[in-house]
Image (cartoon, rainbow, N blue to C red):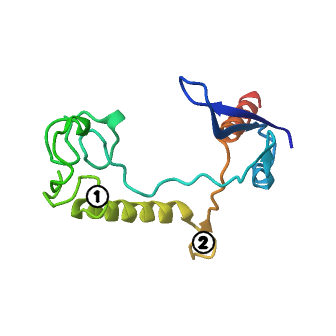
Amino acid sequence: MAIEASIKLKYGSKVPLNMFMLTFSADEDIHKIYEINSILRCNVNILPFRISKLIPQCKKCQDYGHTKNYCSNGPRCVKCTGNYFTHMCTKLENVQPKCVHCKGAHPAHFRGCKKALLKQKFKDKNLRTKVQQKSSKQLPSISGKPTTVIKKQTAKPAATSVGAAVKSNLGQRIQ
């Protein structure tokens, strides 16, 4: 298995991070990556990438469903609902916080907030529906009964799938 490894450096200070970037050719078996136990003389434990199941919350306006990089709303304080960034808040720490969403006695980033729970429940429901739609597909059958095909999702690097798509498209054009 031909894998190239490089140590990731912190932006600006160039301090080495406890993170590596691995690159390998498209024809390699990517599942063998989990058998690696050392990289550049460091013991490692490689785990599959996990996507967060939590609904994103903006750190600028405190609303759900987007992040501060994609926010066009004005700033809201996470502690007191003021129309300014949280770091500008002068509220004392011993004073009870106030939620932007439900006006409850908790900060706006509290995941137990009624609005957060409602939005999370809605996202989970939509996610389950999308997974069910992708995982099974009804196909017509000669016998008249529908045939169910279950697609198994496998983790492949983007370069592999794009490269395979490019190769197959080139092959079709040449023919």
Q: Quadrant of the N terminus?
A: top right
Q: Mark 2 sits on what residue?
A: 147
Horizontal and vertical percent for residue 41? Answer: 81, 42
Which quadrant of the view contains residue 34? bottom right
Which structural element holds mark 2?
strand
Instruction: State the residue at coordinates (77%, 31%).
Output: 175
Please state if 71 lies on the left or on the right of 133 as rendered. Answer: left
- Of the residues shown, which amino acid type is indicated by label 1? Phe
Residue in the foreground of this view, choosing between 52 and 39: 39
Q: Is residue 45 left or right of residue 124?
A: right
Q: Is residue 142 above or below residue 91?
A: below
Towards the viewer: 153 or 63: 63
Q: Secondary structure at mark 1?
A: loop
Residue placed furthest toward the top: 12
Task: Give the CA distance from mark 2 to mark 1.
Answer: 46 Å
Residue 96 on image: x %, y %: 16, 57
Quarter residue 114 falls in: bottom left
Mark 1 surroundings: few (<14), some (14-19) or many (≥20) residues within 10 A = few
Which image quadrant for residue 135?
bottom right
Q: Which mark is first along the chain, 1 or 2? A: 1
Amino acid at the residue labelled 2: Thr
Identify the residue shown where x is 63% and y is 71%.
142
Residue 163 has which mark?
Answer: none
Tell us which disc is closer to us: 2 or 1. Answer: 1
**Residue where numbered disc 1 is placed:** 110
Dot 2 and dot 1 residues touching (CB under 8 Å): no
Circle 2 packing at 10 Å, graded few (<14), some (14-19), many (20+), is some
Q: Considering depth in this image, is 98 or 139 the residue closer to the camera?
A: 98
Q: Position of residue 159 (x, y in %)?
A: 68, 36
